[in-house]
Amino acid sequence: MGAATVEGMEYDYFRYHPMPEIHSWMARMARAHPDVVTIVDYGQTYEKRTISLLKIGVNTGAKKKAIWMDCGIHAREWIAPAFCQYFVRQILRSYKTDPKMAEMMKNMDFYVTPVLNIDGYIHTWKSDTTRLWRKNMSPGPPDCECAGTDLNRNFDANWATVGISFDCCSDTYCGTRPLSEPEAQAVTYFVGSRKDEFLCFLTIHSYGKLLLIPYGNPNFTAPNYDELMEVGLAAADEIKKVHGMEYTVGTSPAVLYANSGSSRDWARLQGIPYAYTFELRDDDKFGFELPEDQIQPTCEEAYSGALHIITYAHDKTFKGV
């Protein structure tokens, strides 16, 4: 049921895929949809793997607005890359028959990174003992025996002020300085150099069934806090309509825990108006090891939520177009 044919090859969107399969899927999507899909390489991991995204949109010849989505910034959150792939499939399926998606693909480009933390993701596939690895794979400071930095504590956004650890063995180790990690640098440079184009910055995580808005530091409030909450609550309503799943909406300190140095907060500080973190299923029953039979409902409901935010941002920007 989850398989879709791309260039005559079956791809099952409702199971987890190792990195080589995701890379080959990206190449096939670009070949199968050459009019609207291109692969853009925009950085390297610590282990010198290329970080790539799919740029999806109709080439109008004009400068366009844009939507950002990244998945897999935390290695063990396998449902996130699964969602990015599903999201790509859905927008490519719908834009030729759905007038609204066709309009959005004409006015905006979608930049989707299926796996940002490629080194860490590959590490989680090696064995049961590495399955729950969270960080990237860069070595710690010279006096540390542990590897890895939490990429979502490494962005230049109130860096190292709250909700982080300076212990290099901690899952929330923030690095030696802001943007010490090449993966965080790649996002910063790519998005930052085009920040006026981006309307939405959606970063996909698990778990907890949450929609988080800026900021992770409780001492700061987003200038459009009320609008972010309103749009987020409406997105949560759309999520609930699909399978009855209830998502909680709020700032991280209000509904989860305080943190700093996240990509979401960095994006909002750059002036990107709609910055959200999706924390997908599950709860504490399965945690990061969400069974494959939950991939489909998780993706279906999250797609409805993401589409609401994206559509809202589009319509506000292009009202009357």
Image (cartoon, rainbow, N blue to C red):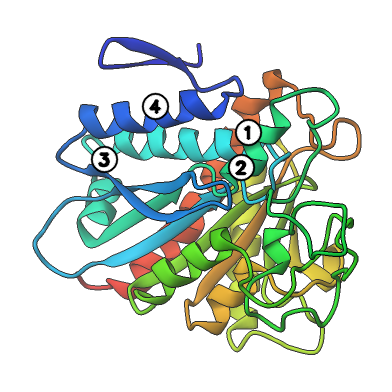
Q: Nearer the viewer, residue 112 or 303?
A: 112
Q: Which residue is identified by label 2?
A: 119
Identify the disc placed on residue 122. 1
Q: Amino acid at mark 3?
A: Tyr
Residue 289 in the image: above or below residue 255: above
Identify the disc placed on residue 25. 4
Q: Can you tell which of label 4 and label 3 is closer to the viewer?
A: 4
Mark 1: which secondary structure? helix
Tell me, yes or no, if residue 82 can be seen here.
yes
The residues tagged by marks 2 and 3 sit, at their Cα atoms, a distance apart of 33 Å
Provide residue 293's location: percent of width, then percent of height.
69, 18
- Please tell me how crowded label 3 is: few (under 14), some (14-19), or many (20+) other residues with Cα within 10 Å: some
Residue 183 in the image: above or below residue 122: below
**Looking at the image, do the residues carrying marks 2 and 1 touch, with CB atoms under 8 Å apart?**
yes
Q: Hey, which quadrant is residue 317 in on the image?
A: bottom left
Mark 2: which secondary structure? helix
Provide residue 184's location: percent of width, then percent of height.
57, 64
Mark 3: which secondary structure? loop
Residue 109 horizontal side relative to residue 195, left or right: left
Provide residue 268's location: percent of width, then percent of height.
56, 78
The residues tagged by marks 1 and 3 sit, at their Cα atoms, a distance apart of 32 Å
Identify the disc placed on residue 95. 3
